[in-house]
Image (cartoon, rainbow, N blue to C red):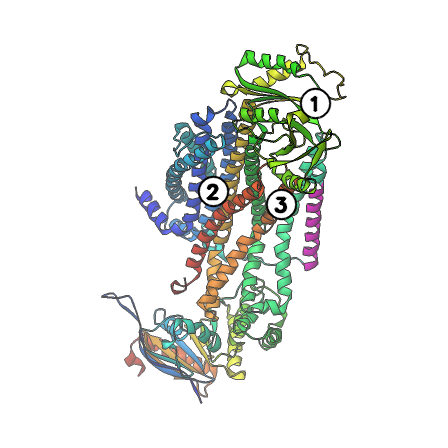
Amino acid sequence: MMYSKLAFRNIRRSLRDYIIYFVTLTLTAALMYSFLALGFSPDILAMTENMSMLTSGILMLSVLIALLSSFVVGYAIRFMLGQRKKEFAAYELMGMEVKSVRNLFLAENSIIGGAAFLLGSLLGTALSGLLNQVVQNIFEIPHRYQVLFSLRALGMTLFFFILMYGFGMLRAAKVIRRRKVIDLLYDSRKNEETGFRPLHRSVLACLLSLAAMVAGVILLGKGLHIQTNEAMLYWGGGCLLILTGVYEMHRKIPVLLYQLAKRNPRRKYREENLFFLGQIGRRIQSSGRTMAVVSILLTVSLATMFVGLTMGAGYKANMEAYYPYDAGVAIDAPLTKESLDSVRSFVAERCEIEDSVTYYLYAVPHEAIEALSLSDYNHLREILGLSPVPMNSNEFLVHCDTWNYMDGIRQGLEQQPEITLNGRTLTPAETPIRTEPMEQYQMAGTKGYVLVLPDEVASQLSGEKIRLAMKLADGGYPELKNELRQFLNSGEWQPDIQPGQELPERVTMGVTVKAWGVANSLTGFTTISFCGLYLSIIFIILSCAVLAFEQLSAIDQNRKNYAVIDRLGVSGRRQVSLIHRELSTVFLIPLFFPIILTILLIVGTQFIFGEAILQEGLVLFYGMVTILLFCAIYLTYFCATMFLFKRVNLRPEMR
Amino acid sequence: MKEVLKLEHIQKYYGNGGNVTKAIQDISFSVQEGEFVGIMGASGSGKTTLLNCISTIDTVSAGHIYLDGTDVTEINEKQIARFRRENLGFVFQDFNLLDTLTISENIALALTINKVPAGEIDGRVREMAGKLNITDILDKYPYQVSGGQKQRCACARAIINNPKLILADEPTGALDSHSSQMLLSTIQSINEMLGATILMVTHDAFSASYANRILFLRDGAIFTEIRKGSDSRRTFFNKILDVLTMMGGGVNDVL
């Protein structure tokens, strides 16, 4: 009873040390619960048959997160033990048994852990409602805010929380048991080494790290162009080299900058720079490895978050255009329209066809564009619920729903406003470019755009590619895709070639079924997005927590140092400014490469995949979302650390 | 001789209401330029509180402290930093050196804070290090040198800006007897050769014997004061011991 009272009092007294720890535990529990609740939600699981992918992904990641978090809990506990070693020494000197001191510390931590779990679960329940809305939004299901409460998710969160906390507690118990009173009393008197290797060695190490990073990027680039499994080797090697490079660069660049700054007397002796450099030098020396690891974790987190969000959103953007029709068959061969009647019958046996159209993509002589007849085009529009397009017999229009071709088409129309086909000159229609999503695996042109011509002009061209678009009752079903494909490849289907035409050497054939696309791809990408988000946010939180504890572990030494400059005549205002400068630098050092690499990743993605994503500005938008989300978490930890730093280092009137 | 420091009826109370502790009660004295004054007293006699009030680290409850004519009790928070860096030098028992800087940088820190031009700093540090015989350890870090060397570095830092007053709080408290002796000789030479005015708080009679004048505090008030005059240090040391013996009794035993 007495211990529990003492434990509560200790928590109140050590609130300063516990606050970041508590916030980290709460956020981890909240994220764990909200994502698990999402993964276990019957409504979410019922969306598609393979939605269990999300559950498996989140469960597997939760195990990984629990293990990683246990290291951070251990780290935090070591920090708190360091802060309170004299107090524990006093208990032991008064005759309290080591076992009792350990139990007291464990009791305190259990209270904190319990409170963090309860608060985290509450926050997680609120957060689950938001995640639920996001998923339903992705699947375009009408939605409203509704929290997800799942006993199973709560149980799993508790299990993972105990797993994570249990490891940390075991480590703490071990540390307390092994520490002797003399270590607890005089540990802070041990010297901290601040020596650095010569400047030329730092320069050499930086150059080698840079070379490793460049080699890594080259290997990744090569891997992208290899279609076999060998590509995995290149990617693995490339990633390893980049990570090693980033790690070493992070260890050495701050050392190099520090050494260079100290070599220049003007910079070194300007105002309080000497003190500042000393402070930073010690942080680089004692926390260099941690900062480098944090930097890698942040790089991985930012990349995971960005790739996850962009892939998910990008695919969703493309889905609209990839699957406007319930089902479509595209055969790049000059078949007769009757050849596709049996295909239509095959589908009709399985589900009701509400509407369908069989049409040709006509070859336009001397032009790299295909053409559709106006009646086919309007029929397709009708299937999609779009109004028919009126067009005079001497006009044409271009349909293009791929944004990145738009500028080229506009320029082409300005340069060549008239086209002449079979002796008839056509001018652009009133609306010369139509952009509604109608493309579905080359259904409207194989190049991403198509020319729409009056029927009488189109019919004189050669119909070299044939298409069948269908509108099905209830949108069809996912298995239809494989059934259709099997039918087309079986001997059952006997297509006829148009008179006077020949089959090309290679016939490209495509089958698209919207239900299949939604069921498989969207689920996959939702899983990737959410797992990426889950992992990256927790990684960022854990990295920030480590960084904050790393700074706070030196707080007592810092207090002494600031007291020295206070007596030497540095004003309160300058001390505040020095604290801002010191902490900002320490928090910025691990950010340097993650931010540069993330920006490179965003720009590179825009450059390489931008054209393939049909929604303009999507890559940049999610790049910004990634950076803003990251900044919000990072700034929260930075401000909390700053608050504690000021409280401890400055006299009350200066805070 | 010019009066550098003057204390007028200083009082310092802690606590409030019915629970007031009088740390200093009505102390007045003055220090002339170039004097080496020791303040002695048992634990709790108020000597460190007095030093903290003079150094502007703590505030007085009543009275005035004038340093070179400026009333430090009237200085506001914004002016204190400037006042300290331009007028005071500190030497503490636990050295208060920054482990993050080398010995040379620790000395230079006081100059940079006082906005001395960068080009002058290294020269002045070397010159001061030469005077205090610590040139060969300038590039070492505090944890690589002995306690005596650390304290000489602290002395160098305290005097490099030529402050009007050097305040030393138990400077030999963390040193062995040999290092203490060397440091006290150094402080004495700083006083004699450089003409620095020093106010040293100590409870050690041997350390106090290096001063020219000693103020003895008891229960927050000046118990008595003795001057070295033309006495040898040994004689002065014996006088100090005599006073300390008397302080075990009452004021009547001394007078």
Q: In the shown orientation, is residue A604 left or right of residue A522? A: right
Query: Callout 2: residue from which chain?
Result: A
Q: Residues within 10 Å of mark 2 (few under 14, many from 20)?
A: many
Q: In the rendered structure, does residue B208 fall within the stretch colored magenta?
A: no
Query: Which circle marks residue A463 in the picture?
Result: 1
Q: Are the residues at dot 2 and dot 1 in contact (C-beta closer than 8 Å)?
A: no
The residue tagged 3 is A603
Q: Which mark, residue B224?
A: none
Q: Residues within 10 Å of mark 1 (few under 14, many from 20)?
A: many
Identify the magenta region: A198-218
Residue A365 place in picture, x, y as percent: 74, 30
- Left or right: residue A437 versus residue A134 is right
Figure check: A403 above or below B36: above
Q: Chain of mark 3?
A: A
Q: Is residue B130 left or right of residue B203?
A: right
Q: Amino acid at mark 3?
A: Val
Question: Disc 3 vs disc 2: Cβ atoms closer than 8 Å?
Answer: no
Q: Residue at x 51, y 56 (%)?
A: A583
Question: 10 Å neighbourhood of mark 3: few (<14), some, or many (≥20)?
Answer: some
Q: Secondary structure at mark 2?
A: helix
Residue placed most toward the observer, A54 or A315: A315
Nearest the viewer among A326 and A502 is: A502
Q: Which of the two marks, 3 or 2, is nearer to us in this view?
A: 3
Read off the residue under disc 2: A73
Marks 3 and 1: CB-CB under 8 Å? no
Amino acid carrying mark 2 in the image: Val
